[in-house]
Amino acid sequence: MEIAKYKFKENKAPGGTLVSLEDKKELPFAVKRVYYLYGLDGNSVRGRHAHRTLQQLLVCLCGSCKLSLDNGSERQEFLLDNPAEGVLISAGMWREIYGCSSDTVLLVLASEIYDEEDYIRDYDEFLHFAKEK
Ligand code: TYD
């Protein structure tokens, strides 16, 4: 299973670092929506769903958390702990986010606006979807 990981250019200056993510340059898709998670409970699991068409780029801006990606036949785990790195979640991936430190701020850049119809929230339905794909 090939998961695209990005290492962004860090514009370092004595006063701090700046990372820019620009359409058609660093970004793998046109961003239509941005959201972020914080105040995460390290004992809870977020996500636990897949999307039919949505693509997302995850960047852990602060703190650290674990991401598990499952394409229906393989599963990979990632540690997100660097604001200069991103992981692309393509369509049809079951994702779980867990083990977050209490200071985690997780940025999500999404290719589509919010649409509950695009979610697959049942794991068996996801396995069926992944098999048909
Ligand atoms: P959800 O995607 O289920 O979050 P998670 O997988 O991290 O648990 O979304 C949680 C709630 O937030 C759900 O009621 C829908 C709402 N929501 C929006 O209104 N807009 C959005 O862009 C997202 C991602 C969620």
Image: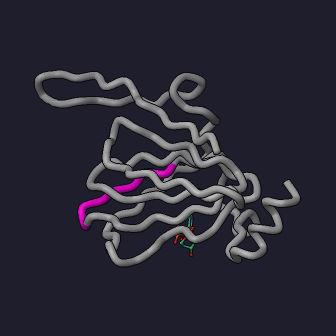
Q: Give the camera-side residue of 72 and 63.
A: 72
Q: Residue 78 placed where, x, y %?
A: 44, 51
Relative to 131, is 19 on the left or the right?
left
Nearer-the-camera pick, 58 or 77: 77
Placement of 5 over or under 11, stated as above or below? below
Q: How many marks do you count on the picture?
A: 0
The residue at the far right in this view is: 132
Nearer to me, 126 or 23: 126
- Which residue sits furthest left? 14
Left or right: 81 in relation to 132: left
Can you say whether 124 is above or below 13 in the image? below
Image quadrant of ligand 1? bottom right
Quadrant where the C terminus lies? bottom right
Q: Position of residue 73 (x, y in %)?
A: 70, 58
* 111 to 74, vertically: above or below: above
Q: How is the image coloured?
A: one colour
Quarter residue 15 falls in: top left
Residue that appears at 56% across and 28% down: 23
Q: Residue furthest front?
A: 74
Magenta residues span: 102-108
Placement of the N terminus among the 4 image quadrants = top right
Q: Is residue 4 left or right of residue 52?
A: left
Q: Position of residue 122 (x, y in %)?
A: 70, 77
**Residue for point 47% across, 33% down:** 6
Res 130 → quadrant: bottom right
| Residue 56: in magenta span | no
Tell me the residue at 62%/40% (across/down).
2
**Splitting the image into 4 quarters, where does residue 132 fall?**
bottom right
Q: Residue at x 40, y 59 (%)?
A: 66
Please state the horizontal and vertical placement of residue 12, each as a whole percent of the image.
22, 23
| Residue 104 sits inside the magenta stretch | yes
